[in-house]
Amino acid sequence: MAKAIGLITANYSTKFPSPLTDGRPAASIPFLGRYRAVDFALSNMVNCGIRTVGMIMPYNYRSLIDHVGSGREWELTRKGGGLFILPGSAFGTSRTGSRFLLRDLIHNKVFLERDNADFVIVSACNWVYNMDYNELIDAHVASGADITVLTQAARDKDVDVCGFEMDGTRVKGIKHGVAFGDTAFLDCFVVAREKLIELLDWYKANDYLDLFEALTGEYERVNVQAYNFEGYAAPLFNKETYFKSNMDMLDPKITHELFSIRPIMTKAHDNQPAKIVTGSKVSNSRISGSCRIYGTVTNSILGRSVVVEAGATVNNSIIMQGCVIKSGARVENAIVDRNNVLPEGTELCGTEAAILIKDKA
Amino acid sequence: MSKKELLAMLLAGGQGSRLYDLTKDVAKPAVSFGGKYRIIDFPLSNCANSGITTVGVLTQYRPYLLHSYLGTGSAWNMEDGVAILPPYATQTGGAWYAGTADAVTQNLGYIEMNDPEYVIILSGDALCRMDYADMLATHKKNNAELTIAVMPVPWEDASRFGILVADETGRIVEFQEKPKEPKSNLASMGIYIFNADLLVNELKLDDANPDSSHDFGGDIIPKLLADGRRLYTYEFNGFWRDVGTIASFHETSMELLGETPSFDLFEKDFPIMSNTLSYPPAYFGPDAQVDDCIVGNGSKIYGEAVHSIVSIDSVIGKGAVVKDSVLLPGAIVKDGATVINAIVGENSIIEEGVNFGSADADKDYAFCGNNVVIGKEE
């Protein structure tokens, strides 16, 4: 492959999945029990051979740094290249909803200038998918475009997903919010490294804009092509899509595509295998390491070290790391954030239409 | 290199021939155990939990998987790294490790390079949780020159072990190798702490002795006793298993199960570390029935699993039953197959509808090695 470097804008902060993003950046929202949102962008880059990744940090970066560390799990602890932690805007980009704020890219131009790679893959980390980015680079080279954006026909209406106005495969404009079937932006694009530096110089007077907003009116001059990703991709922008995307992981066909073809790396923990005790009942669920299940778990996703005591029931819910569901408690249609201890007899029930969120303890 | 108080030498060259096909391709310390671990994780985690940061691992038999698994040793927080020590050649030639003591003798240079005060000799193929720092404290308190970890065994089994006879202060007065009439029931666990100077000298003497079989139990310990050296026992009463045979491997695996297992992986104070790949959480299908199991990440259970170890990345198909068994990582039990009282090797496949193993308690455990396919009998 042509040599590429990666740039992850990890400072997008969503208006939602609110209580879930009160204490952590969107990039480190837990997904499927043991992963975090950033794992997908980072692993996709490493899996296609990228060994130099810059990560523009959100202001509340504690959990993200805790997770990525020096990049060891992604083989980015190395002498040449590796993981570069880059500064981002003071309070993230939630107000404008932009993914690729020019100011953030311009401030980190040195990262782009110091390398001699041909291409840069720039990605946010609010989408879950597993892709060989070499496909994207190949398509980019073949079309001769200035920028090639990764897209997919929207599977649902979503006000938080960006979409493109299209003319064939050529982008004519960007918009916030998509309807079913629209060309949804997977918040990832490839561009020649020198071209990106040039674009940043062109638009530095408008550095409060997102790159693709700055291009508005310029799409005749700048050739932006869309490349359609055929595989599974799921957004993590709000409570509804967060819940739905997690629940998709109860389909082994989807998880096979997402985790088995190329690995998704994540921070390693010394967790024991899960322990399923006599008298328990677990069906159609995902159970992470160090869980201990004495009660009933159905249609649910459990993070690491969750204990479900005898007589407790968990149905259609996401239980994050370290929670204890005490005997006789009942959880249904809920997202229970980390380290909650639900006392005996607690009823924590939302409805399918209105999923309940219990904040981090 | 800075001086270290305690250096560990981990003997990991053993074949484990009585594990038959389980060690056909891998050394015994690299055999999978407990859902996600390999046997060597236990002594290495003990080292980490005891504050030991430098470990030499002596390898010989089928080393590839073991070497790649060890990596730099960072998975066990070995800040000075794990040094992999296979047999090597010198100007005067080279030789395989001829015995436990010979393996260490051939690496005296490694010990001298690290210049420790004490050396702990460990076995890479036994399962236990042990605080080596406490053993060292006992060694120092006794002003001993060699301390041997011992474990009380039932008197009727004592004649199967190397037995140490000690006085009331713990000082060893006699060593009996597999005695017909044991005078003590304290069995050697093959874990030794030596004063480093003594170890280096004795190994050099042993190396020059043409009559020696170069074994710690058979040669070094009897000689030190005869010399009147200060040898002490360190009594250990926790969990210790050798898992040297198919039966003991199976039985020890089963000891991980139950609500209060005799070997509890969930014990908080002494975590077992490992070097495994990332897999998604285990998947339990809509009709899964799982009773008293430990289940590793990446596994998929569509059928029934009872009182079994379901290791990482293994699969139990629809209508399949796995009972009182051990599925090693990546094992696949296809739809409708049954696995009872059995061990299925890594990445091995039990084909659809096959019955592997038997509920008949008089029969031996069924087992297969790694990467094999068990089809219907012709």
Image: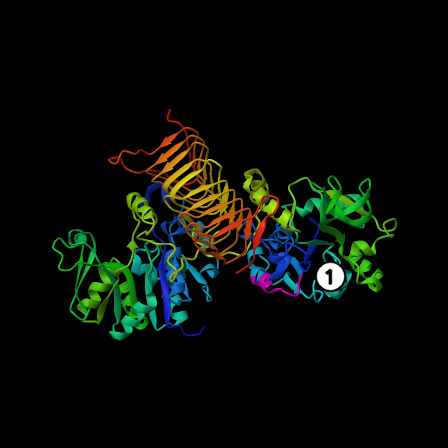
Task: State the residue at coordinates (33%, 34%).
Answer: B357
Task: State the residue at coordinates (31%, 70%).
Answer: B136
Asked if residue B378 is positioned above or below residue B28 in the image, the reply reads: above
Label 1 Cα crowd, 10 Å radius (few <14 / some 14-19 / many 20+): many
Left or right of B318 in this view: B216: left
Please provide percent x and percent y for residue B222: 20, 63
* Residue type at tag 1: Leu
- Residue A59 in magenta stretch: yes
Left or right of A122 in this view: B378: left
Left or right of A167 in this view: A127: left
Of residues A357 and A211, the one drawn nearer to the viewer in this rendering: A357
Please provide percent x and percent y for residue A307: 44, 52
- Residue A159 in magenta stretch: no
Please provide percent x and percent y for residue B7: 37, 67
Please provide percent x and percent y for residue A249: 56, 43
- Range shown magenta: A56-66
Task: State the residue at coordinates (82%, 39%).
Answer: A168
Asked if residue B170 is positioned above or below residue A53 in the image, the reply reads: below
Chain letter for the residue marked with disc 1 in the picture: A
Of residues B176 and A307, the one drawn nearer to the viewer in this rendering: A307
The local secondary structure at tag 1 comes to: helix
Of residues A186 and A22, the one drawn nearer to the viewer in this rendering: A22
Q: Is residue B338 in view from this perspective?
A: yes
Q: Name the residue under label 1.
A: A112
